[in-house]
Image (cartoon, rainbow, N blue to C red):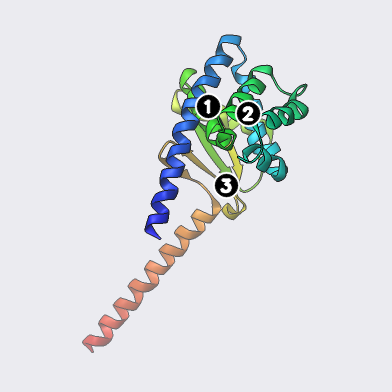
Amino acid sequence: MAENGQNDASFDSGRQHLGAVYAKALIGAAEKLGQTETVLSELESLVTDVLPKLPQFDAALCSPRIAHEEKVRILDQAFADKMSPVLLNFLKVASQHGRLDCLRAIAVAARKLFNELRNRLEVKLSSAQPLSNPLRELISGRLANLLGREVDLQTQVDPELLGGIVVRVGDTVYDGSLANKLNRMRSVALERTTRTMRESLGRFAQT
C-alpha cells in the first residue's frame, strides 16, 4: 500500500511539474497578445465546466489510443468559433506532446502564475450557500483592505459548513463556519463534563 501511495505522489508531482511548465508557456503567449485574463478564464471554464459534464469527450482528449490528428479535428470541431485562437493552438500543442491529461494541473499553475505577475493574493473561500455577486465583491474588498493586496477570491460551496464561511490564505485558515462553532461548543461541553466527572470521582474516593 505504501508503495502505491508513493507512486501516486510521484505521478501527481510529475503532473504538477508539467502543469507549471506548460502554464508558463501559455501565460507567456497570452501576455504578448494582452489576452491573459480571457485565456485563463477560458481554460478554467474548460476544466471546471465543460470537461466534467462531458466525460466521454474528456476521455477522448486524454486517450493515448486516439491519434493527435483526430484530437486536432475534435478540438477544431468543438472550439474553433468558441475559444480564443491562442488557447486553441495551445491545446493542439499539448495534444501533440500527449499532455491533454494535464489540463487541470496547467489551469491551477496558470492561475498561480498570473496572480504572481499581477501581485495578487489567492484567497479560497468556502461557504454553505453560493455567494451572490454583491456579497462576493464586498468580501473581496474587505479582504483586500485587510491583507493590503489585491485579492483573487476563489469560492466553493460546502454544505457541511451549515453556515458562515471558511477563508484560506496560503497555509492560514480562518474558520467562521457554524459547523466549527458547534464543534467548539461540543468540545467545551465535553471538557466540562469530563472535569465534573473527575471532580465527582475524586470526592467519592476521599469519602
- Identify the residue at horizontal 52%, vertical 16% (top origin): 28
Q: Which amino acid does label 2 sit on?
A: Leu
Indicate the position of residue 76 as horizontal and vertical percent values. 74, 25
Element type where label 3 sits in the image: loop
Q: To which residue does mark 1 refer? A: 110
First in residue order: circle 2 vs circle 3:
2
Report the disc number at residue 164. Answer: 3
- Where's the N terminus, which quadrant? bottom left
The answer to whether 186 is drawn above or below residue 33 in the figure is: below
Q: To which residue does mark 2 refer? A: 43
Indicate the position of residue 24 as horizontal and vertical percent values. 49, 22
Label 2 to label 1: alpha-carbon separation: 9 Å
In the image, 104 versus 139, the foreground residue is 104
Q: Which amino acid does label 3 sit on?
A: Gly
In the image, 154 versus 80, the foreground residue is 80
Q: CB under 8 Å between callouts 3 and 1?
A: no
First in residue order: circle 3 vs circle 1:
1
Label 3 to label 1: alpha-carbon separation: 30 Å
Question: Which residue is outermost to the left?
Answer: 206
Q: CB under 8 Å between callouts 2 and 1?
A: yes
Indicate the position of residue 167 as horizontal and vertical percent values. 50, 40
Q: What residue type is labelled 1?
A: Ala
The answer to whether 103 is drawn above or below residue 194 in the figure is: above
Of circles 3 and 1, the one toward us is 1
Indicate the position of residue 58 as horizontal and vertical percent values. 67, 40
Label 2 to label 3: alpha-carbon separation: 30 Å
Question: Label 2 neighbourhood size at 10 Å, few (<14), some (14-19), many (20+)?
Answer: many
Of circles 2 and 3, the one toward us is 2
